[in-house]
Image (cartoon, grey):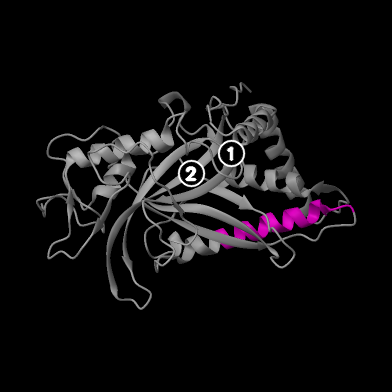
Amino acid sequence: MGIAALIIAAIVSVTVASCKKDKEEALAKAVSYDAQALLSKIEAFQTLRKTVNSGAKTDGTMTINEMRDVIDLTSNFEHSQHEIYCVNTILDTIHVAMPILDGEGNVSEISVVSAYNAFETELENLMLTIDDGMDIPSYFSIILPEDTEDQDIDIVFVRGEQDDKHTSAGPFVEGDNYKWGLGLGHCPVDSTARITDAAMELSRKFKYQPDPQHQGLSHPFMVEHVTYTPMDCTCANEPELEESVFYVDPNMEDCADFWLYKQSGEFEEEPCIDYDELNCYWRSIRRNIVLSNAPLHYAPKNHSPYNECSIKGYWLFGPNQNKRSERIHAAHVTYCYIFWAQDPFSGE
């Protein structure tokens, strides 16, 4: 089986020494894995699952970090459909019980298999009950409980609606004028055009897509999800923004007031964003997130590199459901490492 090397982004130059050290240590950890080693871990866990699920006994154990890694690897290998472009995405979370630690702080292999089985059952049940069209799951991020009061592993992932008409052509040109969000379409409104908006069109520019010869062969690892906003959203009644990060671009261009769209005030007709302003946001997303020297290029917790970005529009309200005249774009960023496999083995 031919295996290409694990793709690793170059270390970004940073101004704070401690942050640079953290990123270098994370990079060193990732480099210690090659693609064959990662695939071997997945295959070993798949074999273990078949053994345990068949009723055979095992007294093996693993550390909680080994558990996190193997659930991360296997869930993304078997279930992440990250190469499919989705016209709209949301973050969802599956909760599974955290295995009990033994006296040495390890978990049994049987309990890890049970946790993964529970994850698959919950994912399958969720997919069967979805009625919003967002039935393409991808990028599973494994978050272990931080204290004894939290007894669940949180598996956070992206869920979206497949867009068969996707094209990655860009940047924006004259005539690419769209309503700010809510799927309200073009400006001026064209009833014959496919429903879209400025947030969806920006998202299309930042979808992860492997080169043609690697289609179907890429696999995420060490996934982390972060949502960035151009304003403090702590009072917003949007659950998706509860853990968002308020970020200010220190080098903002004069083509827009904020690095992501933010508009205050009341309007008889929802605002439009023209192609010049869209290009401004496109540049700022690249400048702040995408490029290897961007300040947000690495995840804040596990320091995985940028993989893709999805832009979503929010109309914020006050605490009593009174209309609050703030319309914003938020940038949902997925961070992860990608490794490549030729002729991947079956996950059955």
Residue stretch in magenta: 104-123
Q: Say whether residue 125 is magenta.
A: no
On the image, the x and y values in percent for residue 59 come to 88, 51
Q: Residue 96: x percent and y percent?
A: 65, 62
- Residue at point 24%, 43% (across, down): 256
Mark 1, secondary structure of its residue: loop
Neighbour tally class for label 2: few under 14, some 14-19, many 20 plus, Cα within 10 Å: many
Q: Is 122 inside the magenta-drawn segment?
A: yes
Image coordinates for residue 286, horizontal then vertical, percent:
37, 34
Query: Which amino acid, mark 2?
Result: Thr
- Give the quarter of the figure containing the N terminus: top right
Rendered position, 343 above or below 163: above
Q: Which residue is mark 2?
A: 334
Name the residue at 32% across, 38% down.
252
Q: Is residue 64 left or right of residue 320?
A: right
**Looking at the rendering, which quadrant does residue 274 occupy?**
top left
Q: Is residue 173 above or below residue 328?
A: above
Secondary structure character of the magenta stretch overall: helix
Secondary structure beneath disc 2? strand
Residue 224 position, x and y percent, is 55, 46
Q: Residues within 10 Å of mark 1 (few under 14, many from 20)?
A: many
Q: Nearer the viewer, residue 52 or 146?
A: 146
Quadrant holding the C terminus: top right
State the residue in front, 289 or 43. 289
According to the image, label 1 marks what residue?
303
Residue at x 22%, y 39% (from the top left corner): 255
Q: Is residue 33 left or right of residue 180?
A: right
Work out how far the residue at label 2 is from the one at label 1, CA to CA, in angstroms.
11 Å
Q: Is residue 80 visible?
A: yes
Amino acid under label 1?
His
